[in-house]
Amino acid sequence: MSTNPLASLLPGVLDGVRVLDLTQMVAGPLCTLLLGDMGADVIKVEPPGGESARHIGRNRPGGESDYFLSMNRNKRSIVLDLKQPKDIEVLRALAARSDVLVENFRPGTMEKLGIGYESLKTDNPGLICCSLSGFGSTGPYRDRPALDPVIQAMSGLMQLTGTAESGPLKLGVLLSDFVPPLFGTIAVLGALRARDASGVGQRIEISMLDATVFSMVPREQYFFATGKTPERSGNAHYQMAPWNTYATADGKHLMVVAHTEKYWQRMAQAIGQPALPQDARFIDNAARMANRGALDAILADAFATDTLANWTQRLTDADVLFSPVRDFEAVFADPAVREHMVQTVEHPTVGELPLLRTPMRMGSTPTTIRRAPPLLGEHTAQILAELAADGHTMKETTP
């Protein structure tokens, strides 16, 4: 795990852009994290008790939550009670001096507070407001609460995951929390580019349901062509074979994919059965799919004859498309991951805190981790002082 020597030398692509962050949990904070990593000054507005993620999964010295630490570097925290008129005034002053506002309240909440986009843009026509919500601001589901597993279930994603025996399963990662902020970030960058030409901002809306449905491409074309949901097939593929996981002699697993004839030939050579592709049952993909049970049994028997380490070498030498199925210990011990993806920063209560870098390698304007995740309200006084220096007369504000 290393630090980035460029962090203090080169400005990010969004250097000079101010982002007002009214988000919580995962989907919203991930959007503002990406903007912050690209150089934006992100001001995170939190209620007096802190945003929801501060109270989930506490497992660090000082009570810091792994959820919060993961999603909130490169941000400054200010505490504002948006039920109080004086703090709404501060929020409006900040919005008037910001380029982007990102929020993930339920639709209509910002308007009820008097800080909806139509109101804020009167003071700042260039403001870009990105709203992330479960189901969008229109339609029959707009007022429903949403979290990742709810969206995975409703989008059809969960129905694709698992086996006939297991029934539908959620993914082991928060895909429905992860994909929407990627689209939100792309849309914000596009809106900033459009504002360069017009001087006018705009409202962006991202629905978690929409984004998750889109994430299933190209499965939707199978449905549009057949009228059927792709079968739940575990680690196998619903249209191609061989494509599955297989246990090795030491009880570990390999993921092996042969989606083209080239890779099918290489796999057969690597397992010592070069004549297998000429078997009528496996002569092409259609035949292999029709006889997938028999094919998987042959491959399972082959891979069970040697250890994971030996198969890794043999399959690598044969240029087979494969990977060991790795646990986190193996992933983060891998120099290729550790050097490119993990950076350690100093945190006031945690001490040395490893964080995942964003995977965007930009040569001239690199993404950076410049600031540890903030303590609650750590920068309130600093931000209020900046507002005062900018000419805003402050009333007494929530500490």
Image: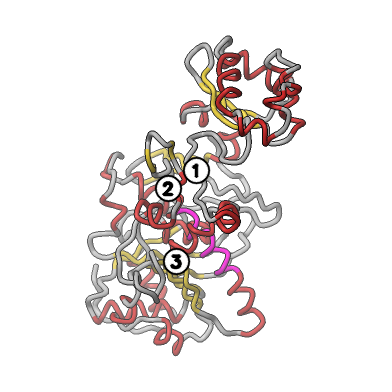
**SS at mark 2 in the image:** helix
- Residue assigned mark 2: 159
Q: Amino acid at mark 1?
A: Glu
* Residue under the image location 27 percent in, 74 percent down: 82
Coloured how?
secondary structure
169 relative position to 40: left or right: left
Query: Residue 376, image x and y in percent?
Result: 30, 57
Which label number is shown at residue 231? 1
Which label number is shown at residue 207? 3
Let me know if residue 382 appears in the view: no
Let me know if residue 200 appears in the view: yes
Classify 148 as above or below 87.
above
How many other residues sit within 10 Å of disc 2, few (<14), some (14-19) or many (≥20)? some
Q: Amino acid at mark 2?
A: Gln
Queried whether the magenta region covers residue 253, the answer comes back as no
**Does the residue at mark 1 contact the one at mark 2 (Cβ under 8 Å)?**
no
Classify 375 as above or below 78.
above
Q: Quadrant of residue 66?
A: top left
